[in-house]
């Protein structure tokens, strides 16, 4: 991957002026008539060519160091991005687990709400039955008190109780046991 990123630029940098000078110098040496030169001129020319070659090699080394440094920087960035990616994946897993937990919690809450609603309906029905039972007992007791001295207020109250007890269509009150004064409730 790093070779693909740095490949074309490294080749272009290697074909820089130092390498070009080396190629030009070798071409000049081939053209020079070595037979007509003295030993000192040839040694001087060779030292100059060696210095140019060394300069070209030093420049190539620097370019390679630059490319290696860029590769190291890219590798460090890749490591950092992998670490960030790992942290994000861990956070994503935690959030997913939290969503599952909240969904389960919401489902439990709905189930609990429906159970409480059923319980409320049942308790309302039981309370209606108990109130009807108390009203029947009260009507029976007031029936026993009427031979004493009934007051107009008691007569009003007894009339209301009889109306609610006898005219209301409550299943528990429709079957009221006249002897005990308790309603007879059908078993479910």
Image (tube, rainbow, N blue to C red):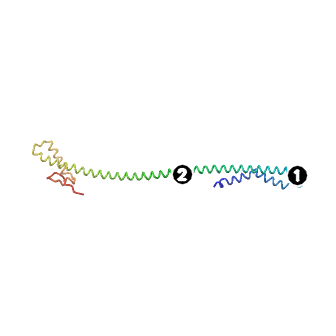
For the residue pair 24 and 63, the one nearer the viewer reads as 63
Q: Where the N terminus falls, by quadrant? A: bottom right
Q: Which residue is mark 1?
A: 39
Position of residue 35 in the picture relative to residue 157 (left or right): right
Q: Position of residue 145 (x, y in %)?
A: 12, 45
Task: Give how far apart the Cα atoms at labels 2 and 1 are.
Answer: 69 Å
Asked if disc 2 and disc 1 are in contact, CB closer than 8 Å, the reply is no
Crowding near the residue tagged with mark 2, few <14, some 14–19, many ≥20 C-alpha atoms within 10 Å: few
Q: Secondary structure at mark 1?
A: helix
**Residue located 38% across and 52% down the image:** 108
Crowding near the residue tagged with mark 1, few <14, some 14–19, many ≥20 C-alpha atoms within 10 Å: few
Q: Secondary structure at mark 2?
A: helix
Q: Which residue is mark 2?
A: 86
Q: How many marks?
A: 2
**Residue located 10% across and 44% down the image:** 148
Instruction: Find the residue positioned furthest to the bottom.
Output: 188
Judged by depth in the image, the label closer to the viewer, 2 or 1, is 1
Position of residue 112 in the picture relative to residue 8 (left or right): left
Q: Position of residue 87 (x, y in %)?
A: 53, 50
Q: Position of residue 26 (x, y in %)?
A: 81, 54
For the residue pair 40 and 115, the one nearer the viewer reads as 40
Position of residue 114 in the picture relative to residue 153 (left or right): right
Q: Where the C terminus falls, by quadrant? A: bottom left
Name which of mark 2 and mark 1 comes first in the sequence. 1
**Residue located 85% across and 51% down the image:** 43
Residue 139 — which label?
Answer: none
Position of residue 93 in the picture relative to residue 153 (left or right): right
Q: Position of residue 104 (x, y in %)?
A: 41, 53
């Amino acid at each position: 991957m790093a070779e693909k990123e740095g490949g074309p630029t490294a080749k272009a940098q290697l074909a820089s002026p130092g390498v070009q000078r080396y190629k030009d110098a070798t071409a000049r040496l081939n053209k020079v008539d070595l037979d007509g030169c003295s030993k000192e001129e040839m040694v001087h020319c060779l030292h100059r060519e060696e210095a140019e070659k060394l300069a070209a090699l030093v420049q190539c080394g620097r370019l390679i160091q630059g490319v290696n440094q860029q590769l190291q920087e890219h590798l460090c960035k890749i490591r950092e991005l992998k670490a960030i990616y790992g942290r994000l994946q861990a956070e994503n897993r935690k959030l997913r687990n939290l969503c599952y937990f909240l969904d389960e919690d919401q489902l439990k809450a709905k189930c609990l709400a429906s159970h409480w609603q059923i319980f409320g309906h049942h308790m309302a029905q039981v309370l209606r039955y108990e109130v009807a039972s108390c009203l029947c007992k009260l009507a029976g007791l007031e029936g026993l008190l009427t031979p004493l001295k009934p007051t107009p207020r008691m007569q009003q109250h007894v009339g209301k109780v009889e109306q609610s007890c006898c005219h209301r269509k409550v299943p528990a009150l429709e079957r009221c046991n006249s002897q005990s004064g308790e309603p007879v409730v059908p078993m479910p």
